[in-house]
Image (spheres, coloured by chain):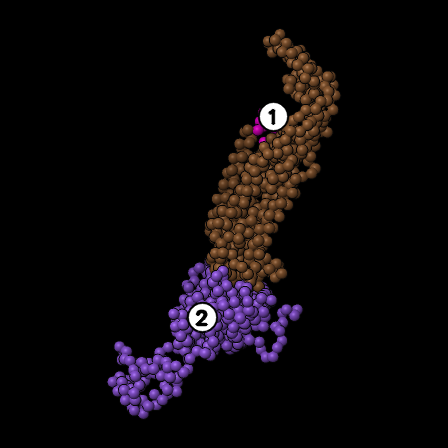
Chain colours: A brown, B purple
Amino acid sequence: MNAWRLSVNGLRTVTELELKQRVRSRRWITALVVWFVVIGAITSLVILATSQMIGGEGSDQNPGPMAFALNVFFILGMGLIIAPTFTATSINGDRSAGTLAILQATRLSAAEIAIGKLLAAWLTALVFLVVGLPFIAWSMVTGSISLWQVVACFAVVFVLVAVVCAIGLGWSALLSRPAGSTVMTYLSVVALTIISTFVMAMLSPLVRSDDVVRVWGIPDSVQTEYQAELDNYWATHTDGDSSGLPQPPTDRCTWKTETQENIHMERIWWITVINPFVIVADAAPLPDQAYADLNKYASSAADPLAMIRLGVRSISMPPATERDDCIQLYAMSDYYRVDYDSDGTPRVTTASGNPVDIDSPVKRRPVTVDSPIWPWGLGANLLLGATFLWVAVRRLTVPYGQLPTGTRVA
Amino acid sequence: MSDNQPPSGDGPAPGIEAIGLKRAFGEVRAVDGITFTAPASAVTALIGPNGSGKTTLLLLLAGLLQADAGRANIAGFDVAANNLEARSRVGWMPDSFGTWDALTCTEILETFAHAYGIPRPASPARVATLLDRVHLSEFAARPARVLSRGQKQRLGLARALIHDPDVLLLDEPASGLDPRSRIELRDLLRELARDGKTVLVSSHVLSELEEVYDNAVFLSRGRTVDTAAQPTEAAKRGWRLDAADPVALRTFLDAVGIPWTGQPNGEVIVQLAGYESARELIRAAVGADVPLHTITPVAGRLEETYLSLNEERS
């Protein structure tokens, strides 16, 4: 097909034209300077604020990951906001300016015009993202974030910005009015980020069901006995001394079946995978200890990227069919401490550090880190971008058959 | 690469060949059966009232719009079946077009040179030649936004010529041009025709076309009008006469029995059938010692035909 013919010369011609037209204005420099100042102020603020809130004397928490994550999210968010401005009026704007048809009449193919415009817009958006890199480098150094993590995060952000550029291009080809295509492009970005999460949340009551689960716990009669013992203990120890607290009757734990209400997020969790913020969080390489035990790392490290990854991967797993109530008896008591091995086996120690011999048949299920979900999200986004690009090429293909309502050729 | 070779045939292919072209936009039948041929090495005028389908016809020929029916060949290439080849042989100048404000004239023309696949090393020279040809050399490095309307129009013409097309489609090229530029445009069109190009030019300034056209295609309501059926030669046309002695002229006309109408400035208008009658009138007037110094048709032929088309509108 002629419309899809691509040549280096054709792409270069359109891209150069778009870049020259866009870059050669004072406003461009002004916008970059303002942008540099704004992004510098915000990222500095984030780094300072997180260092005040997290860590400090006697804490083993590092504010670096939080600062880095917030800064990456800020730059991604700004990228998603500015990218539409470069393409959302690209085609319908040129059409009303009378500069589109004379290009279509040349040897340039529809694909060369569309992809050239996309490339130019993407490169422009990248300049804005790259301006933020010094501040990212700063939060990388102060937060001892690996270079690999920075590179991976930004590669994903760059791709996502390209997708948004393509969406804008598609809308500008579909709708004749620049105002309409701008609104639709921003709505698309909102749909990817906020609406997708909202839809998932609103769907969650609909995926509730009562499931039968096996429970490792104490029988009701024993529970009543134990509660009476506890009440008795506290009645005689009004000073709050818990050192002689009766041990939970875990030796009398046994299997029983119960009906439990579960929210089957594993049926709808995939909606959130389209969200650019989730994709970046899931794609970010984490420190080695996070791979050893994501659960432990996420709960201790104050790293939003790890927390989002843990959250998304957790809700992707179906609810467990076995439950350990006995371990909860230890966990609820101040006198005991519950930890988990990396394979999910619970270990109980007394507050003074002596191991307690328990015999729990239920392991905590580890959250998988070796089956990433971000490729699906990125793939879905790329597919979306490709669809909009395809629409743009179709709409630019000459000779025109059916003309969209409200448009003129020239 | 048979696609790149024009179909072989006897003699040079006509630049433009349109057969039964039709194109509707919804209910509006903008082009409703246009058939004509525009030969190479000639300027063909495209004439018709507003809304007669001129611009749509040019879009069809430029390969931007699909015909509902009929077909068109550009330099031997079918616009539908071989769109790219046809497109690359057309220089199209729309009636209104935009420029990239931030780009200089040179950059705009170079962009189009590249878009037509002219080798990049060769394009600066080509651009300079064309800027010179349309007398915009002094604006070569200036941004296009400083150009006046007429200068923009000339830049548009240079843009349409950048790839040395076989066929030129010009939609109202004279609009916005000052008289001098109009004369230059006329000379340029003649030059292009002499170089073997096919020039199709639409204009509502008929006096411009009058001096430059070789053939004319008349459009009315989206159709070509059979010009042969137009009573152009036989019908009487108005001629304007003026003499050093207006009274003697009037007396003479009365004497030979030619009805006349006087004009406020002393001229008189008479109705004559064809050039032969005009010649006889001149001979008789000179013979009668009338100091006749001006005899000219009131309107050009194009204008007369055009007006007769307008009459059918009512």
Label disc, if present, on residue A59 of the rendered structure:
1
Judging depth in this view, the residue of A319 and A138 nearest the camera is A319
Q: The disc numbered 2 marks a residue on which chain?
A: B
Q: Residue visible at 63% across and 69% down?
A: B4
Are marks 2 and 1 in one subunit? Answer: no
Q: Identify the element where label 1 is drawn.
A: loop
The residue identified by callout 2 is B220
Is B174 left or right of A313, judged from the image as shown? Answer: left
Query: Where are the magenta residues, as a range?
Result: A54-64
Q: Using the image as rendered, state which of residue B294 and residue B125 is in the foreground.
A: B294
Q: Residue at x 73, y 17 (%)?
A: A251
Name the quadrant containing residue A241: top right
Q: Measured along the vertical axis of the image, is residue A170 above or below residue B1?
A: above
Label 1: chain letter: A
Image point (64%, 45%), residue name: A379
Q: Give residue B249's quadrant in the image.
A: bottom left
Q: Is residue A344 visible?
A: yes
The answer to whether residue A103 is above or below residue A300 is below
The crowding category of the residue bearing disc 2, from other C-alpha atoms within 10 Å (few below 14, some 14 to 19, many at least 20), is many
Closer to the camera in the image, A256 or B280: A256
